[in-house]
Image (spheres, rainbow, N blue to C red):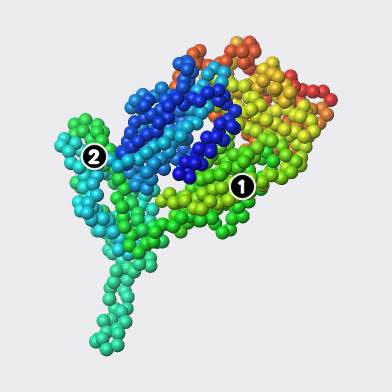
Amino acid sequence: MEAVSGLAQLLLILATLSPQSWAQSLVRLNSGLQVSRGQAVYVTEKELQFNVLDEQDTCKVEVVLNEPVTQRVGKLSPQVFNCHFLPDEVKYIHNGSPLLQEDTVMLRIYRFTDSETFLDTLLLRVRVVEPQDSLIQLGSLPLEVPVFYSLSNVIDSRVLTFQNRPDVICTVRLLTSETNVPTSGQLVRDDPTKTPATKDVEQPSAPNSGPRQGRQTLPCPGNKACSHGTKEVRFLKANCEEFLTLGLKYQHLSPPSPEIDYVPIRVELRDHSSRALLEMESAWIPVLIHGAMQNQPPRAAFMSMFILEVDQFILTPMTTAALDAEDDETARDELVFNVTKPPGQGYITHLDDHTKPTASFTWQDLNEMKIAYQPPNSSYAGRRTYEVEFQAIDTSYVTSDPIMVHFSIRSAETNAPRVSWNMGLDLLEGQSRPITWENLQIVDNDNIDAVHLVAVDGPLAWAAERPRWERLHVQGSRSTRGCGGVPSLGQRHHQGLHCVTDHGWPTQHPTQVPHQHPPQRRHSSLPDQQRGLRAAGGRVSAGGGVHAAGLRPGLQRRLHRVPAHHPPEGGRGHQEGICPATGCASEELPAEGAVPGPDLLPSPWRRGV
């Protein structure tokens, strides 16, 4: 329930942060799903409908994958589908886990018009019920491991049985690679080429107990993993009857562990003649581990400071020095953090798409510094502090006590221009969108009118499989190059800065012939984290020369593309009115290592001394 509450708060943050249009909700109906454990269910118009008033508009639905507290016991496919989906197109498949009674799927809806992009986000709740007619029946004899590191009893007809039906083919698959279960052991079978490992243990004789027994050969003790003359079975597909005669066993490997583990399988019934899939069901076979304790919840790590220092406007990555947790039964890289109390202003995001907030993330992403905090775009004179609460979740979905982290934002003390807001764009190939103040915001303390924007890398893109171009264009300029001209902020407000994507070659002058090979990319001398759309003018000379000092590292404008199934009419999808009649000429980029100056700026924006 804590995960669902955190996701609900995330939806409120999305509604306030997104620069796209929110004139009305794109969701007409969202009644949720009901699925039998281990089975699949199709999404129909009875559960999910969208508001698409104009049939000519393109409407797409994307399944959000970077929220680990969603789709925990199942998957919704396909990842991207049309708002007008077919009755048998969108399907939720439960993986058979008995650990949760409900699941959540986050969907992001895009509606693209000729001039605007509408965006909405919803949570599709999935209720898990027990199947009425199951293909898998657990037997009276459970799988049991008597001591740590030992083997269980054999998986046979006493442990589970399968429902037999005439004229069908019954097959069993292991789901170990898909579910990362079992967590504390592995499935094995006897290997004739190996001999069981044993250890000689001397048995002391008690007084007056008769002659000494000497040394006896006993099974491997329970203080280390030893070979039992077996080999691991990680991938398996077998007939249902054959599966119960393979002599499969569970081997315990890593104490301390919870008192129960699982072996996941999937049963498929196919038509005998056509091999068409008729029915499918997944189940997790429980394994009882004697001597183990009940699973304990995660806890906050002792060495973390739980304080994140943030500079004003700066997207700041989080590290394990600011937030960390540990668990006795779950490895650290398998832990998940859920944001139960988001910051009062700003938002936590994943750097794979820093324009959208996130409500959960993995410890692995936190350790790799892929999780960051975007402070608000408002300026304050003094330091501000926000209290943010997290919860750590282990592989058994047991949550920790709330972990409090203090986000401390210090005010900036610089006169260099900075990017205070960068929310990116969402558009289809072949469309254009204006870059507005809601998408990109620049601040400067002393002279905002002297700040210019320079495109140093990124907008001009080439795809090997198909010629595809992207560029930025300034309305009223005589030429475009990636970012067409270098407008000042005042000019950008009045004239507009557009992002254009083309299908095919860029517009050429009638006398020019396009080359039949991709152009050589010129790379900026700036490091990778500084490429993209920049606010130039850390120090602006009297002649308008731009120096690199004072630029904030890590600023980049991201262009998010949702591919269209069909290109716009007209072949290349060029937008009328974006380029002059003579075509979009290209300005030369500065040579590597060069600092842009007045002579390197496009001619419409050069200023004399």
Dot label at residue 387 = 1
Q: Spatial distance from mark 2 to mark 1, Cα to Cα?
A: 49 Å
Q: Residue at position x 40%, y 33% from top?
A: 32
Q: Tell me residue 339's x, y (percent).
A: 53, 44
Name the side, left or right, on which 354 lies relative to 200: right
Q: Position of residue 547 (x, y in %)?
A: 76, 34
User: Badge 1: few (under 14), some or many (20 or more) residues near its Cα, within 10 Å?
Assistant: some
User: Quick check: can you spot residue 595?
Assistant: no
**Res 227 quadrant in image:** bottom left
- Image quadrant in which the N terminus is located: top left
Side of 389 where 96 appears, left or right: left
- On the image, the x and y values in percent for residue 379 come to 71, 37
Residue 156 image position (x, y, % from top left): 21, 52
Residue of label 2: 133
Please state which of residues 9 and 241 is positioned toward the viewer in this rendering: 9
Quadrant housing residue 540: top right
Which is more toward the observer, 579 or 504? 579
In the image, taking residue 447 as reference, residue 259 lies left or right, namely left
Rendered residue at 32%/75% (across/down): 201
Residue 572, above or below 152: above
Question: Relative to 91, is 363 on the left or the right?
Answer: right
